[in-house]
Amino acid sequence: MKKIIYPEQLEYISSFIKQDNVLIKKIEKYAREHKVPILSKASSKFLEQLIIITQPKKVLEIGTAIAYSSIKIGRNLSSEGKLYTIEKSRDIIEIAKNFINKAKLEDKINLLNGDAREIMLKLKTKFDFIFLDADKDDYKKLFNLSLKLLKKGGVIFIDNLLWQGFAATNKVPKKYILSTKHIRDFNKIFMRTPSLCASILPIGDGIGLGIKIK
């Protein structure tokens, strides 16, 4: 069988993803300089497309970081759409708030500070779309909480399920052994969840895409 995806193919595809938004460029620059993990360009483009297609009224993001994906979601929501995004770091949440204000999306984005595992238990609303991108050792717990908050027919979007390729290889660097185990264990749970129609897509660092069917 002939392989399709090689580094040069990925580079070719990425060459079409141009960024002309000045603020987004600044956030990407900040992420590079301060080593803050953000969604890859391919993954964030796919996320934006899904938001445009599904037009969710209520979105939950678990893991705000510097609000890179928050802004990409927020600017594609309908006039009725609202994003609730959770970040536990007090230091980074101020940076996120600053970028959200610069994007003039403070009315569309509700920034929640605290432990997602605690905040999600207190949420009284159901969501049309949930984006999970938090600590990998918490994925199972956060995923279970997400399923309870996701409406039937709703979409869940999860990043890092290929984990830099380590999820699919036997040669894992020592410092990634535990996190890779967390991802592999989670992937089995995700793909075998009976209430979801689930797929793992080779986009960016691996996207888990699920639709709640029951």
Image: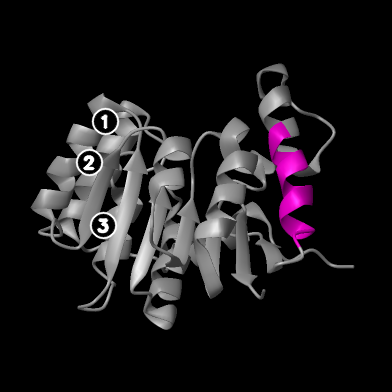
Question: What element does badge 2 sit on?
Answer: helix
Q: From the viewer's perspective, tell me whether residue 93 is left or right of residue 8.
A: left
| Residue contact between numbered discs 2 and 1, judged by CB atoms under 8 Å | yes
Kind of residue indicated by mark 1: Ile
Q: Residue at x 72, y 37 (%)?
A: 166
Is residue 205 visible from the viewing direction of this image?
Answer: no
Q: Which residues are magenta?
A: 182-193
Question: Which residue does the numbered mark 2 point to in the structure image?
Answer: 96
Kind of residue indicated by mark 2: Ala
Front-most of 110 and 207?
A: 110
Question: Which residue does the numbered mark 3 point to in the structure image?
Answer: 71
Question: What element does badge 1 sit on?
Answer: helix
Q: Position of residue 104 (x, y in %)?
A: 10, 59
Quadrant in which the N terminus appears: bottom right
Q: Position of residue 51 (x, y in %)?
A: 40, 73
Q: Residue at x 22, y 57 (%)?
A: 109
